Amino acid sequence: MSKRVTTVILIMVMVLLAAGSTPFAADLNDVIGALPKFAIPMREVGDRFQNICFAAKDGNWGLAFYTSKDMNGAMNPAKVTKLQEYGLWKSFYDETFAPVNKAIVANDFKAFEKEYTAVIKSCNDCQAGMGYAFIKVVNQKTPSDVGIDYRVPSKAEDVPK
């Protein structure tokens, strides 16, 4: 072994030994405890869900598709913090919400409106079934994010992979 490789290995061993002697400030449970549970990701989902409708209504199908993907990604912390609830979300997005995504990809507002309305009913039924009947999704009169131009014409396939 060359002197240089031996020196690098020795330095790595010293660094590892030093790191092992220094207590880590948090354990895995502390990290998981700092992640948002379900309410915060659901708030993100709700805002994006509303924005999707405004984008579709104004023909910005790229924004609608991008926002749908982003809405789904907002639930990722629940994979760690609320695995059972995340399973319900995944099933909802992959099955119940799929017709909305299909309408977005087809640039079909009539189909979109029908499926989006069905999703609102499904959301409210699910909330009630879980004991949260006091949470009721409505179709907002204005988007959650007013800082976006929803009227930019685009297609779902415009969204980078």
Image (cartoon, rainbow, N blue to C red):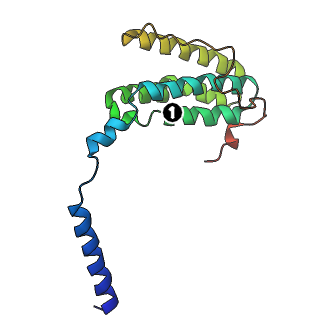
Taking 19 as reference, is 106 left or right?
right
Image coords of residue 55 (percent x, y): 70, 27
Taking 146 as reference, is 69 left or right?
left
Residue 64, image quadrant:
top right
Image coords of residue 85 (percent x, y): 36, 26
Answer yes or no: is residue 108 visible.
Answer: no
- Camera-side residue of 3 and 107: 3
Check disc 1 and report its element: helix, strand or loop: helix
Label 1: which residue?
A: 72
Q: Is residue 73 positioned above or below 118 on the image?
A: below
Q: Residue at x 26, y 80 (%)?
A: 10
Q: Inspect the image, locate mark 1, and give the three-letter code of the amino acid beneath it.
A: Asn
- Camera-side residue of 94 and 9: 9
Quadrant in the picture for the N terminus: bottom left
Q: Residue at x 48, y 30 (%)?
A: 94
Q: Which residue of the protein is positioned furthest toward the bottom in this rendering?
A: 2
Q: Which residue is drawn at 43% across and 13% down?
A: 127
Residue 80, image quadrant:
top left
Specify few, some or many for label 1: CA neighbours under 10 Å numbering under 14, 14-19, or 20 or more: some
Q: Which residue is drawn at 52% across and 28% down?
A: 44
Answer yes or no: is residue 135 visible.
Answer: yes
- Camera-side residue of 159 and 25: 25
Residue 89, image quadrant:
top left
